[in-house]
Image (cartoon, helix red, strand yellow):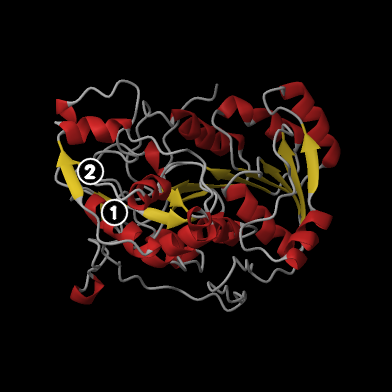
Amino acid sequence: MAKLVTMQQQQHRYIPSISPSSLSDFGGIRLTIPIQQNQQQKKKVWHRKGGLQLQAMASSSSKKILIMGGTRFIGLFLSRLLVKEGHEVTLFTRGKAPIKQQLPGESDQDYNDFASKILHLKGDRKEYEFVKKSVGAEGFDVVYDINGREAVEVEPLLDALPNLEQYIYCSSAGVYLKTDLPPHFETDAVDPKSRHKGKLETESLLSSRGVNWTSIRPVYIYGPLNYNPVEEWFFHRLKAGRPIPVPGSGVQITQLGHVHDLAMAFIAVLCNPKASKQVYNISGSKYVTFDGLAKACAEAGGFPVPEIVHYDAKDFDFGKKKAFPFRDQHFFASVEKATTELDWSPQFDLVHGLANSYRLDFGKGTFRKAPDFSTDDIILAK
């Protein structure tokens, strides 16, 4: 297991400015951020109307890319963008889910084009000798590690690819130590005891091995095909016409980022010299309160303003069940480093992003988890 080492980055602490016109009806705050435009890359327009029409950055150099994972949520959108850029993309998976599946709203033409080009390497990433042998035989230029949790899972990939050009890792903003001075910046203290400590150790391993690496730290991710009960938790209650139980006062501030914006950030760091050996927080540009999120989900799905019931979590014993899908605390991060260095910015504001998720997924009757209102009933019965 790699040792956790202190990582220093050359970065000043940004002080975001907040204007009165930036205040959201849903308790969010839009940061006023200077964005440096990169004239060497032109971003194609991504249309929100209708289905998901994924557009990538224009690229002049095709790479042989390995995605660890790729058949769920983030990987589904990222693999599309990479294929559209003209890269040769291989998914490394256990083969339990099909590597070719049509996205909600994706045209038959776009799907068929993707399906004809995507490649598959079947295996278990925890079978380290197989990983070294199979991956080494292919000789990939770039690795996108979407599902890595522990440093020991990454070492075989680095051993197998001595000429690797870039290792791009999906970490988490959950690695930060809780602070009284939010938002979290990339230079903030991390928590070696967090449940994401394996991701911290992976970042440390990448740094110690001297490879060209980039780490992306998302906050909460939402969007079509989300396998975590983020927006879906609210949509289930809104559809059933039920009150929405929210812990505490409901003014806890959090942050969500759309999956497409996250995928675009992953594209923005590819072969980008500015991203070498750097960490980036990625999420939406607005923050939102818990109550504001409930109202935003209602507007996005066309529901009436919901009844919100506040409760003290200390008054209840829910056993192993989670009564609310978010940390009961302020939790949000600055994305200003990414916007200034990567020519990247979120394309979705919160309500439009939630509406996109609802229209292409939950609104069609599809969801990952069936509704469970048992903890709600305990709260409402008191």
Percent from the top left, x then y, of residue 330?
24, 45
Q: Image quarter for residue 285?
A: bottom left
Residue on which disc 2 sits: 246
Q: Position of residue 8 (x, y in %)?
A: 41, 44
Of residues 370 and 88, the one nearer the viewer is: 370
Report the residue that reaches farthest toward the bottom.
Answer: 39
The tag on residue 328 is none
Answer left or right for 361 relative to 101.
left
How packed mark 1 is, by other alpha carbons closer than 10 Å (few <14, some 14-19, many 20 or more), is many
- Residue holding disc 1: 294
Which quadrant of the figure has residue 378? Answer: top left
| Residue 342 pos. (x, y %) | 51, 64
Instruction: Measure how far apart labels 1 and 2 are at the Cα level.
Output: 9 Å
Quadrant showing the N terminus: top right
Find numbered disc 2 in the image and state the secondary structure of the residue it sits on: strand
What is the x, y in percent for residue 205? 55, 32
Q: Amino acid at mark 1?
A: Ala
Nearer to the camera, 232 or 215: 232
Is 224 situated above or below 36?
Answer: above
Question: Residue drawn at (54%, 25%), measured in percent from left and top?
Answer: 2
